[in-house]
Image (cartoon, coloured by chain):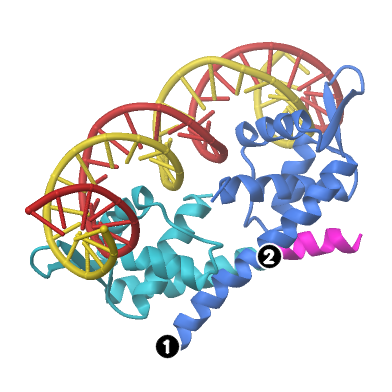
Chain colours: A cyan, B blue, C red, D yellow
Amino acid sequence: MRTTLSKRINELLVLAILEHGPAHGYQIALAVEEWTDGLFSFQHGTLYPILHRLEGEGQVRGEWCGEGRRRKTYRITESGRVIFRAGTTELEEQFRALFALFGRTHAA
Amino acid sequence: MRTTLSKRINELLVLAILEHGPAHGYQIALAVEEWTDGLFSFQHGTLYPILHRLEGEGQVRGEWCGEGRRRKTYRITESGRVIFRAGTTELEEQFRALFALFGRTHAA
DNA sequence: GCATGATATAAAGATAATCTATATATCACA
DNA sequence: TGTGATATATAGATTATCTTTATATCATGC
């Protein structure tokens, strides 16, 4: 499975939040938890490396802003948008196949 | 996320196949690949440890059969069936929430 | 003024799980 | 008799997350 399912989902979650507008790490973590009714969540030790990874790959762009308290605001890039759309489509196909199999079994 | 998503899915895949009838490891791997159109698959280095784990937890029962070529046929247990149904239901809820978030973003 | 808890980011180290590779062995077919 | 498919197992490398710790600001109550 070329790259871990969880890893792909985590990255898509971050991109999904940023599709709504710029946000910094802490906000992203809160938004994911809120919008999925707590079914998905991030530990910060998980989230920040993901943000750095996505930034390194050019899918998001971070900018330090505000003085005093350091906050890094992330925005999704055009490349990130393309990857987000492709990724969600692919994941949806995968889960259709998965639940088709589960459903077939339920019926049996 | 109490236990890895991938781990849970992998276990559910095995249980789903065994809900259809007894099978040995190699058959399970083939069936998963076939029934999900190659979207999910197992390396044997992944599958056999999972089978041993599930057996240890009483979700499946394995029995050596046939002489000469060693083949271990697995059957799902009653406990495994209960866990399978609960697990698929839970996973479905989780994915409904996930795709609801993705969809909301698509619309934005 | 100061302690506390929420906000905010980062990175090192432990843990968990899969993947890769290797080993072993049978069977069918050419 | 050699090759490729069938069949299981395990050690070791890799990957990714989780836990923990460190640092720092801000608001609130005492």
**Relative horizontal placement of residue B23, taking residue A74 as reference (left or right):** right
Percent x, y for residue B34? 73, 54
First along the sequence among labels 2 and 1 = 2
Q: Residue at x 53, y 69 (%)?
A: A36
Q: Is residue D7 above or below residue A68?
A: above
Residue for badge 2:
B92
Percent x, y for residue A20? 36, 80
Does the stretch in magenta take in B42? no
**Relative horizontal placement of residue C3, taking residue B105 as reference (left or right):** left
Q: Residue at x 53, y 73 (%)?
A: A89
Tell me which corner region of the image, top left, top right, bottom left or bottom right, holds residue A71.
Answer: bottom left
Q: Which chain carries label 1?
A: B
Q: How far apart are marks 2 and 1 (CA)?
A: 24 Å
Q: In the image, what residue type sits under mark 1?
A: Ala
Q: How many labels does the image show?
A: 2
**Do pointers 2 and 1 mark residues of a single chain?**
yes
Q: Residues within 10 Å of mark 1 (few under 14, many from 20)?
A: few
**Relative horizontal placement of residue A46, taking residue B70 as reference (left or right):** left
Tell me which corner region of the image, top left, top right, bottom left or bottom right, holds residue A56.
Answer: bottom left
Per the rendered image, the range of residues in magenta is A98-108
Q: How crowded is mark 2: few (under 14 residues within 10 Å), some or many (20 or more)?
A: some
Q: Is residue C23 above or below residue B61?
A: above
Percent x, y for residue B84? 78, 51
Residue for badge 1:
B108
Percent x, y for residue A3? 47, 50
Tell me whether circle 2 and circle 1 mark residues in contact (CB < 8 Å). no
Q: In the image, what residue type sits under mark 2?
A: Glu
